Image: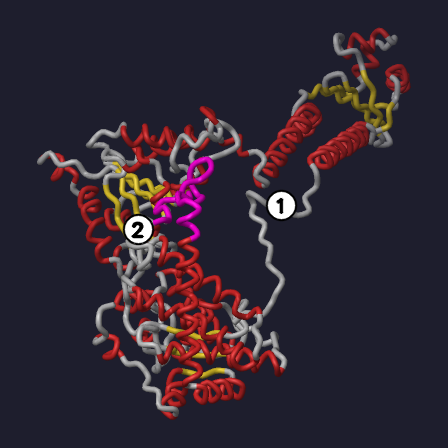
């Protein structure tokens, strides 16, 4: 049951507001600051140079000549055109001479005799040393170094903000996992479950280890392997495990990383990626979410310069151009294989398609053991129970479950993870965190209790509905309360009778509200959406309507206005009206069924609701005790196994 809330508006990066740069200065402000720093350095350098050159008193050359004649100068130091005169009182004066003439000639021009010059010690010094080179080169080097520093800083800033990726246009963005890197190395031991998928991929591992065995007998190993499955089933992990088992370099990249705003960049990156992989062969190229570039071509968007189509064309060319002995295998992952271009899936490209299903109970237990390796578990933890309570969970969900359990234990300052932590984590992963601050008033709490009790009671009475494991009127996520139903065993198929009972269970809360309070609330809105979609699928997809017959009116694949993504309605108005009529008939029949159950078991409904108001949570054992007290037998696994086929 959900309380009325304002809709949450999520703005994607593609269709919504673009994220603003976090407070960064503009490029013009940065350039102005750089120019100001350059001026300060220039002024500072001129002052330093002036200070160095003027620390001795400056005198004209004529004064130096007169002082030599007077006998007050003891020595002259000549360095280039600079003259430093040392007096008897240890003071020094500097002067300049013409660079083209010698010192003797210059002094002679001022009337000094050789005898007077002989009385003064004259020392000629070569120009050099750190001071000379600093004064000579710094005026040239400082501006150049400063200019290169500004260019490097600005390019680094713009590249970090995503504005200057053009500096590395044609280079692929693939990340390399080296086979010698033990930290990132993954093998099949780290991948629990997916037994069939691993057996399919063992051939790839064998080929990468022993290619001659296949080539000599004339066998051609698949050039491409497409991993298909629901999100979180471990497609990327399996691809890394293949590389880890074979001990070869693993180049991984996302399909979206090929496409840029510049036409031709994606194709250039594809060429660079395949060239790099060939040099490192035997190797594996892994393209995650390949449907980002591999969708059906000819959609009418972008014409011949559509960057995505050019990237896809280059991938097709590179894969088809492989030689059998190049020992480079392309692996890709997608949870939307139905939208991929047929050219990608033809023999010679992605020859092998490996389906990765959601794990069954035994696989879930193995996955939980993998993620529990580094976590201290309490003595009461039974992973088999957690596996039984998590049907439909993917590997990523189970990893999140174990992590949430560890977080709960750490939050409560405990050193071990208990079974209670893991049980709470199941609900947190499925429904979101508890919202203890979302307090219901007395009336809302009573309505929520009857709503959830209606779901639970109908599910417990109807023979083909899943048994109830927990009822709660504590808010989680966007729901004010919830009823947790879990099958007693994993199922791959569902029957018509099971669907009909599920629809009746979904209506249980709506019917209970109307029966008890003679009114309905918005809390049943999500239930109505789910059951309506299920009823429509029964009629239009699964052929479960007696009137409409075994016909699939809804297209199996989806067509878009420019390619893929929007369902194409191929039914006439008359047929659509009949489908709507059948959907309404199914829902009204289920409504009547739920109403009969709740009317017949009104006393049990009141007891469950009152207990929920009192304790807020009802676990399976306590709930079943209430059912037994009112003459309702809880479901057992044996009952499910002996049910007749629907």
Is residue 563 inside the magenta stretch?
yes
Q: How far apart are the alpha carbons under marks 1 and 2? A: 44 Å
The residue nearer to you, when weighing 248 against 91, is 248
Figure check: 267 above or below 8? above
| Magenta region, residue range | 553-577
Q: Residues within 10 Å of mark 2 (few under 14, many from 20)?
A: few
Is residue 615 inside the magenta stretch?
no
Who's the residue at 32% across and 28% down the image?
Answer: 317
Residue ID for mark 1: 17
Figure check: 249 above or below 358? above
The residue nearer to you, when weighing 644 against 321, is 644
Image x and y of residue 173, in percent: 44, 38
Q: Quadrant of the C terminus?
A: bottom left
The image's colour scheme reads: secondary structure
Secondary element at tag 2: loop
Secondary element at tag 1: loop
- The residue positioned farthest toward the bottom in the image shown: 629
Who's the residue at 57% across and 33% down the image?
Answer: 164
Is residue 34 shown left or right of residue 300?
right
Who's the residue at 56% across and 73% down the image?
Answer: 520
Residue ID for mark 2: 551
Disc ID at residue 530: none
Between label 1 and label 2, give the one nearer the viewer: 2
Figure check: 530 above or below 85? below
Image x and y of residue 637, in percent: 26, 78
The residue nearer to you, when weighing 272 against 69, is 272
Q: Is residue 236 visible?
A: yes
């Amino acid at each position: 049951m959900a309380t009325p809330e304002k809709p949450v508006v999520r703005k994607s990066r593609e269709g919504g507001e673009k994220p603003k740069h976090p407070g960064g200065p503009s490029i013009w402000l940065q350039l102005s600051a750089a120019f100001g720093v350059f001026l300060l350095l220039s002024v500072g350098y001129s002052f330093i140079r002036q200070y160095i050159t003027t620390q001795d008193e400056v005198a004209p050359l004529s004064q130096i000549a007169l002082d030599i004649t007077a006998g007050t100068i003891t020595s002259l130091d000549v360095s280039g055109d600079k003259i430093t005169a040392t007096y008897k009182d240890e003071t020094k004066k500097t002067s300049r001479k013409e660079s083209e003439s010698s010192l003797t000639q210059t002094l002679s021009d001022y009337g000094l005799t050789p005898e007077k010059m002989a009385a003064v010690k004259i020392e000629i010094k070569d120009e050099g040393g750190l001071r000379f080179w600093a004064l000579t080169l710094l005026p040239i080097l400082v501006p150049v170094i400063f200019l290169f520093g500004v260019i490097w800083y600005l390019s680094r800033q713009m590249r970090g903000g995503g504005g200057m990726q053009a500096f590395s246009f044609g280079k692929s963005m693939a990340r390399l996992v080296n086979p010698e890197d033990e930290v990132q190395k993954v093998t099949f031991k780290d991948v629990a479950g997916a037994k069939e998928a691993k057996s399919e991929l063992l051939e790839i591992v064998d080929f990468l280890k022993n290619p001659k065995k296949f080539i000599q007998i004339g066998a051609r190993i698949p050039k491409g392997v497409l991993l298909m499955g629901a999100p979180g089933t471990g497609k990327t992990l399996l691809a890394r495990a293949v590389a880890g088992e074979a001990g070869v370099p693993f180049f991984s990249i996302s399909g979206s990383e090929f496409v840029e705003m510049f036409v031709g960049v994606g194709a250039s990156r594809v060429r660079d990626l395949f060239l790099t992989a060939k040099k490192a062969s035997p190797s594996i190229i892994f393209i995650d979410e390949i449907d980002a570039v591999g969708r059906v071509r000819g959609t009418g968007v972008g014409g011949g310069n559509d960057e995505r189509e050019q990237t896809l064309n280059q991938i097709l060319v590179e894969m088809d151009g492989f030689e059998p002995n190049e020992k480079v295998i392309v692996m890709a992952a997608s949870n939307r294989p139905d939208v991929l271009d047929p050219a990608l899936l033809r023999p010679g490209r992605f020859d092998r398609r490996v389906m990765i299903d959601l794990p069954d109970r035994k696989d879930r237990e193995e996955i939980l053991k993998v993620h529990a390796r580094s976590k201290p578990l309490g003595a009461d933890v039974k992973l088999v129970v957690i596996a039984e309570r998590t049907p439909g969970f993917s590997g990523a969900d189970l990893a999140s479950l174990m992590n949430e359990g560890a977080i709960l234990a750490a939050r409560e300052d405990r050193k071990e993870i208990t079974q209670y932590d893991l049980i709470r984590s199941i609900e947190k992963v499925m429904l979101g965190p508890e919202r203890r601050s979302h307090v219901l008033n007395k009336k809302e709490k009573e309505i929520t209790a009857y709503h959830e009790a209606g779901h639970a009671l109908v599910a417990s009475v109807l023979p083909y509905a899943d048994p109830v494991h927990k009822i709660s009127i504590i808010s989680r996520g966007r729901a004010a309360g919830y009823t947790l139903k879990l099958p007693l065993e994993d199922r791959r198929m569902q029957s018509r009778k099971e669907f009909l009972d599920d629809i009746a269970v979904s209506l249980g809360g709506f019917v209970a509200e109307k029966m008890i309070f003679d009114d309905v609330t918005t809390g049943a809105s999500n239930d109505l959406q789910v059951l309506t979609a299920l009823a429509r699928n029964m009629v239009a997809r699964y052929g479960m309507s007696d009137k409409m017959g075994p016909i699939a009116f809804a297209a199996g694949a989806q067509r878009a206005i420019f390619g893929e993504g929007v369902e194409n309605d191929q039914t006439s108005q008359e047929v659509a009206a009949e489908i709507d009529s059948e959907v309404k008939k199914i829902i009204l029949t289920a409504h009547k069924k739920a109403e009969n159950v709740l009317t017949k078991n009104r006393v049990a409904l009141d007891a469950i609701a009152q207990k929920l108001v009192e304790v807020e949570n009802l676990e399976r054992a306590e709930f079943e005790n209430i059912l037994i007290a009112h003459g309702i037998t809880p479901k057992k696994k044996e009952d499910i196994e002996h049910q007749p086929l629907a």
